[in-house]
Image (cartoon, rainbow, N blue to C red):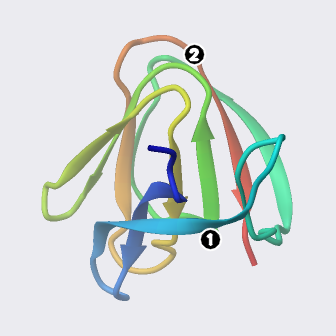
Amino acid sequence: GAPTAWEMVHLKDDGVESSWSTVSFPFVSGGDIGKMTERLPCDGVWLRWTHGSYNYKWHNAPRRQIIASLNGHVEASVGSGDTRRFGPGETLLVEDTRGEGHCTKSLDGVGRWSIFIALP
């Protein structure tokens, strides 16, 4: 059947360690244009390109944000060793602004396009 929510991976922290979970944004309306969630307020949008050799060691997210991957594949790891991979069309809610953070790297050697949506 049709989905009832937009689900995405959630990268969060407890002030010390980063960890993975999932988060859902329920669809509240629909019709001829498709299903939609409630409006999400945002503080800005960045369009980003990174080299295919991208390998960024431990860092925190600079703000709460949703990242949408447009092409290529990236891997993100947290301190426990738990690793997730993301590819074209996938979204990620990033909220690990404190603590140890995470590592990210390109997996396929191609330049990667992504969209960052800052959340309040």
Above or below, 47 against 107 in this view is below
Q: Given the image, on which type of amino acid does mark 1 rest?
A: Arg
* Quadrant where the image shows the C terminus: bottom right
Secondary structure beneath label 2: loop
The residue at 56%/20% (across/down) is: 71
First in sequence: mark 1 or mark 2?
1
Q: Which residue in the protein does label 1 denote?
A: 64
* Quadrant where the image shows the N terminus: top left
> Which dot marks residue 111?
2
Q: Is residue 13 left or right of residue 49?
A: left
Q: Where residue 76 sits: x, y (%)?
A: 34, 46
Secondary structure beneath label 1: loop
**Front-most of 116 and 57?**
116
**Seen from this angle, which residue lies furthest bottom?**
15
Q: Where residue 7 sits: x, y (%)?
A: 47, 57
Q: Crowdedness of circle 2 by 10 Å Cα count: few (<14), some, many (20+)? A: some
Above or below, 79 against 75 in this view is below
